[in-house]
Amino acid sequence: MLKAHSNNTAGRVTLRSSDPRDVPQIDFHYFDEGTDPSEDLDSVVAGVETVRRITGRCQDLIDEEVLPGPTVKTPEQIRQFVKDNAWGHHASCTCKMGPATDPLAVVDSRFRVHGVKGLRVVDASVFPRIPGFFIVSSVYMLSEKASDVIIEDATIATAGPAVA
């Protein structure tokens, strides 16, 4: 199951350790946080129930339901199955770009992490909201802009003070 275009913007990416080779802990908080988590979960559960009603009329074409499977029957069981199995392959929006005055912003418009010298974030996590189902074009645009900004900043840094 794919969960996309949700109102949940409360996922977290945290470091597991100080070892830079250790992969981060990613917790999407799909159905536990956000602006209206129950609306998202209810919509996916309704989708499962709708597909079951449709496929119930086509039993001569379908041997068996594989997922969530015949043991997941009640709306509460479906809810738990969805919470345990829904995923999003376009992880984004965990390091929102915005001014330092925004308590939810992590990076500025030059991709620099607020309050951390020498660290930038250049990936889909800086989007304040997911730009669409297929975000690759937006990620390409973001990386082109970041390349320009980083080169510009490096050029200014290495040029030194202007000579009069």
Image (cartoon, helix red, strand yellow):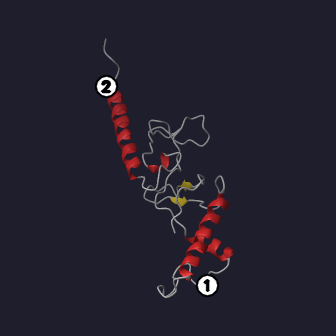
Given contact means CB atoms under 8 Å apart, are the residues at marks 2 and 1 in contact? no
Tell me if 122 is positioned left or right of 64 in this view: left
Residue 14, label in figure: none
Q: Quadrant of the C terminus?
A: top left
Tell me what residue is drawn at x 58 percent, y 52 percent: 9
* Dot 2 amino acid type: Ala
When the figure is inspected, residue 48 is found, relative to residue 108, above or below; the finding is below
Vertical placement of residue 89 versus 51, above or below: above
- How much space separates mark 2 and mark 1, taking CA atoms? 67 Å
Q: Position of residue 117 (x, y in %)?
A: 47, 37
Relative to the observer, which residue lies in front, 81 or 19?
A: 81
Pointer 2 residue = 159
Q: Residues within 10 Å of mark 1 (few under 14, many from 20)?
A: few
Count of picture labels? 2
State the mark number for residue 71. Answer: 1
Of the residues tagged 2 and 1, which is closer to the observer?
A: 1
Q: Quadrant of residue 160?
A: top left
**Residue drawn at 38 percent across, 35 percent down:** 149
- Amino acid type at circle 1 is Thr
| SS type, badge 2 | helix
Q: Position of residue 18 (x, y in %)?
A: 50, 54
Name the residue nearer the viewer: 128 or 12: 128
